[in-house]
Image (cartoon, helix red, strand yellow):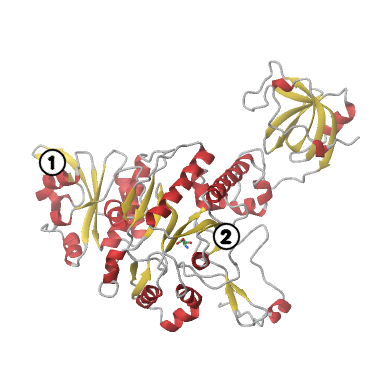
């Protein structure tokens, strides 16, 4: 008789001593099976855990069937829960019992596996992605996606409880300028025209505010055709929200509440509020980056004034060219010559010129600098050490150059050195807001201003008067939420006046015609009673990645793409038939040789 697999009495991780004597029905996958002197043991697995099944020769049909099992066959069994007596297995939650099987139904057989589900993984990522359904079957992946579910649920509940309405926005739409390349979808009905998949619902959520919805939140997919990295996928999910009649503080307060809820529900942790705030300027000064990891020190020190008079060309040239000299002080014996040579090479790989450094020692006549460029500094050794807090045994890493380059390279050194010294605390969650970004950033290559966030970000009221005269000085009403050095959310108060929006477009080099072509609907809407509004988006995938301590977004997206934006499971993207192309009036150019 077949086992009633649709009437499972328990899941595989549930049975305990208290169930001894009960007749139960379980179903799942064969995790392992082994023959032991006449008896056969099978570990049966589902997403809740493992139960050991025992098959004895006196139940000959079941026993015979059990002996044919292979890993990952799907079975259902009925049997009696018995105590394992002294043979308990403390490693699993069900380790005090086993099920003595009276009936088994083999529901489905498994072919030889491309990789094991129950063992260490030692295969390339392509294979894992091709058989993603098998990879997802592994307990650690089940854990990640259940955590993802907890986070998504916490976010949804939180926003619903706070009066936000969830409304969907279109996928087949027009380009939103978030700074990436668009994914395009050709229109069949109007050949030669294209939709863009949204880089974010930015403009639609602003239209919701103008439409009077007041509070909107949506967990939504966004698409950006960028070069992929461990923390970038072509399609990703974000919580997107917008509020009307608010100032920065209001949005930040709501977000903080949500972050608290996420940590509580997903990690059982209480995050103290309010979260610290830091201006972008301070972040750059102290950490060289606008998303600082504040779990450790090694802060940047400006020594431009101190070294100004030194007879050292590398520094002098940088300062004469309007640049700065900054340094980082790090202690410890781990910073050997080999290690620092390696760091220098890394900087060269990033386009840097080198990494002037010196070691501090206690000489007979006082503080001494040793190695490399030491002789140039000797005149100011004591003064410099005092200013930057360096003591004997420390290494001082210098960086001369343009402010932005100095920040970039020293941020890299800071992070690497912290890793090498092992001073980054684990299980610590340093959240902070970064505010007062420059509204515009000068694009050296294109020789024009670009938005630091996006073109709909409002300038600070007190800086508005500089928009025409000194645009680089204007700060904005944006806020980024940073967790341990990763940007987890970003948003802003928006421009809600048409004249200011047009002015910003002009400064960005977007002509009136182009603005009309691309954003006429927004400019139009701003004419018809737009309330002050602002919002934010946070990357759901990124949150899960951080909380799960995963090192790639690919671990937390169910069916991700590879670095080359390919899905090995479905083989997307793939060619299409000539008929499909004809219908769209498209021809494919031959690839360049
Ligand atoms: N649209 C922005 C983004 O996707 C977020 C925002 O400004 O609300 O990054």
Of residues 242 and 376, which is closer to you in this image? Answer: 242
Which type of secondary structure does the marked residue at label 2 adopt? strand
Instruction: Give residue 239's mark.
Output: none
Q: Which residue is denoted by mark 1 in the rendering?
A: 367
Q: Position of residue 163 (x, y in %)?
A: 53, 52
Which type of secondary structure does the marked residue at label 1 adopt? strand
Residue drawn at point x = 80 percent, y = 38 percent: 75
243 vs 590, left or right, is left
For the residues marked 1 and 2, what is the alpha-carbon distance in whole angstroms? 58 Å
- The correct choice, above or below, for 436 with respect to 555 in the image is below
Q: Position of residue 456 (x, y in %)?
A: 42, 68
Residue drawn at point x = 14 percent, y = 51 percent: 377
Of residues 516 and 267, which is closer to you in this image? Answer: 516
Of residues 541 and 127, which is closer to you in this image? Answer: 541
Q: Which residue is denoted by mark 2 in the rendering?
A: 221
- The correct choice, above or below, for 196 with respect to 1 in the image is below
Q: Quadrant of residue 535?
A: bottom left
Residue 353 seen in this snapshot: no
């Amino acid at each position: 008789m077949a086992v009633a697999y649709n009437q499972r009495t328990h899941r595989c991780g549930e049975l305990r001593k208290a169930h001894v004597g009960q007749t139960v029905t379980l179903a799942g996958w064969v995790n392992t099976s082994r023959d032991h002197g006449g008896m056969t043991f099978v570990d049966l697995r589902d997403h809740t855990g493992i139960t050991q099944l025992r098959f004895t020769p006196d139940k000959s049909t079941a026993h015979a069937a059990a002996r044919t099992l292979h890993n990952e066959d799907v079975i259902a069994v009925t049997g009696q829960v018995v105590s394992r007596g002294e043979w308990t297995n403390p490693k699993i939650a069900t380790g005090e019992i086993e099920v003595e099987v009276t009936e088994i139904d083999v529901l489905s057989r498994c072919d030889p596996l491309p990789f094991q589900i129950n063992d260490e993984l030692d295969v390339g990522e392509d294979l894992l992605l091709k058989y993603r359904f098998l990879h997802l079957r592994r307990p650690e992946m089940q854990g990640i996606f259940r955590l993802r579910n907890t986070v998504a649920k916490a976010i949804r509940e939180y926003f619903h409880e706070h009066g936000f309405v969830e409304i969907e926005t279109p996928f087949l739409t027009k380009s939103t300028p978030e700074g990436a390349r668009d994914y395009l979808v050709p229109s069949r009905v109007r050949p030669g025209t294209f939709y863009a998949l949204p880089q974010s619902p930015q403009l639609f959520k602003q239209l919701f505010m103008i439409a009077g919805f007041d509070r909107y939140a949506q967990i939504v997919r966004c698409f950006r055709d960028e070069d992929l990295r461990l923390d970038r996928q072509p399609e990703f999910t974000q919580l997107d929200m917008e509020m009307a009649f608010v100032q920065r503080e209001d949005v930040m307060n709501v977000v903080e509440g949500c972050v608290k809820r996420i940590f509580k529900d997903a990690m059982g942790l209480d995050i103290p509020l309010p979260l610290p705030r830091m201006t972008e300027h301070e972040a750059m000064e102290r950490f060289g980056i606008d998303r600082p990891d504040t779990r450790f020190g090694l802060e940047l020190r400006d020594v431009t004034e101190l070294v100004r008079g030194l007879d050292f060309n590398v520094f002098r040239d940088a300062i004469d060219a309007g640049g700065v000299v900054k340094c980082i002080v790090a202690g410890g014996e781990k910073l050997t010559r080999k290690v620092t040579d390696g760091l220098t090479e890394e900087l060269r790989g990033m386009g840097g010129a080198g990494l002037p450094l010196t070691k501090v020692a206690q000489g007979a006549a006082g503080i001494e600098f040793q190695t490399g460029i030491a002789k140039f500094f000797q005149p100011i050794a004591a003064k410099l050490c005092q200013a930057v807090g360096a003591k004997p045994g420390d290494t001082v890493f210098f960086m001369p150059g343009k402010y932005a380059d100095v920040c970039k390279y020293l941020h890299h050194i800071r992070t690497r050195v912290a890793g090498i010294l092992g001073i980054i605390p684990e299980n610590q969650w340093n959240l902070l807001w970064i505010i007062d970004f420059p509204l515009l950033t000068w694009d050296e290559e294109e020789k024009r201003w670009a938005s630091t966030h996006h073109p709909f970000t409002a300038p600070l009221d007190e800086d508005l008067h500089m928009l025409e005269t000194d645009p680089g000085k204007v700060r904005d009403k944006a806020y980024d939420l940073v967790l341990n050095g990763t940007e987890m959310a970003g948003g802003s108060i928006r421009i809600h006046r048409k004249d200011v929006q047009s002015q910003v477009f002009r400064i960005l080099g977007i002509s009136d015609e182009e603005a009309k072509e691309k954003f006429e609907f927004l400019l139009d809407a701003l004419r018809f009673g737009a309330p002050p509004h602002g919002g934010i988006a946070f990357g759901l995938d990124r949150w899960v990645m951080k909380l799960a301590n995963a090192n790639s977004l690919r671990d937390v997206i169910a069916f991700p793409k590879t670095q080359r934006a390919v899905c090995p499971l479905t083989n997307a993207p793939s060619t299409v038939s000539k008929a499909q192309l004809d219908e769209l009036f498209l021809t494919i150019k031959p690839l360049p040789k």
